[in-house]
Image (spheres, rainbow, N blue to C red):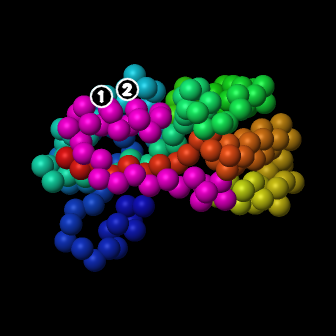
């Protein structure tokens, strides 16, 4: 990634760092967080927004790309059934695929970011696109089943097929979403 940045024709600084957000204190003009926030845990969201707000200049922008979920009441309000399959699948995701993962609700992101001083300027749902992405990943994995099993095992292959196809279903039906929040300082 750094090599690609170095080849860009721009006077702007650009660097790739492999570090957690908690370890980063340098000022930046923009922050892009993709697919990480849902793994921080709800108890760390306020700290994340505070850190981002601190290191951005007055005209700074944070783009937060994260999976979002619904509360039980929101599921009921949207007419989404709370089934045994759903409970088992969510337990599977929480224990076997993303231990410790906690997708926020849209309202959690909006409220926590606002408390820190950010203004939401745009929210974009990528739900149908992400369902399709998961479908394509599952198709590709299925097409390379024998290679995948040779590299790992039948058990790992089956686990990831269950993850990809189950999550695609949850995105398609509306239980989960991928949202991009543009937050201005």
Please name whichever residue, 43 or 76, is drawn nearer the observer in this view of the structure. Answer: 76
User: Can residue 96 be seen here?
Assistant: no
Q: Position of residue 55 (x, y in %)?
A: 19, 42
Q: Which residue is mark 2?
A: 44
Check if mark 1's residue and mark 2's residue have beta carbons within 8 Å: yes
Question: Residue at point 58% right, 33% down?
Answer: 77
* Farthest residue, direction left: 58
Residue 18 placement (x, y as % from top left)? 39, 45
Residue 158 lies in quadrant: top right
- Which secondary structure, mark 2? helix
Q: Which of the 4 quarters of the picture holds residue 146?
A: bottom right
Quadrant (top left, top right, bottom left, bottom right) of the N terminus = bottom left
| Residue 153 screen position, x and y as percent | 83, 41
Mark 2: give few (<14), some (14-19) or many (20+) Cα within 10 Å.
few
Q: Label 1 to label 2, Cα distance in Å? A: 5 Å
Q: Which residues are magenta?
A: 104-132
């Amino acid at each position: 990634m750094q090599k690609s940045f170095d080849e860009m024709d721009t006077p702007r600084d650009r660097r790739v760092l492999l570090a957690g957000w908690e370890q980063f204190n340098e000022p930046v003009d923009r922050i892009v967080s993709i697919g990480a926030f849902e793994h921080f845990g709800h108890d760390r969201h306020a700290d994340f927004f505070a850190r981002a707000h601190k290191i951005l200049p007055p005209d700074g922008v944070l783009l937060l790309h994260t999976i979002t979920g619904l509360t039980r009441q929101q599921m009921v309000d949207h007419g989404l059934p709370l089934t045994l399959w759903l409970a088992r699948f969510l337990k599977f995701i929480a224990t076997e695929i993303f231990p410790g993962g906690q997708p926020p609700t849209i309202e959690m992101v909006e409220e926590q970011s606002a408390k820190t001083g950010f203004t939401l300027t745009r929210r974009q749902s990528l739900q149908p696109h992400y369902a399709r992405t998961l479908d394509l990943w599952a198709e590709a994995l299925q097409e390379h089943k024998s290679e995948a099993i040779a590299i790992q095992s039948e058990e790992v292959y089956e686990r990831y097929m269950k993850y990809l196809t189950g999550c695609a279903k949850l995105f398609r039906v509306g239980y989960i979403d991928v949202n991009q929040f543009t937050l201005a300082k």
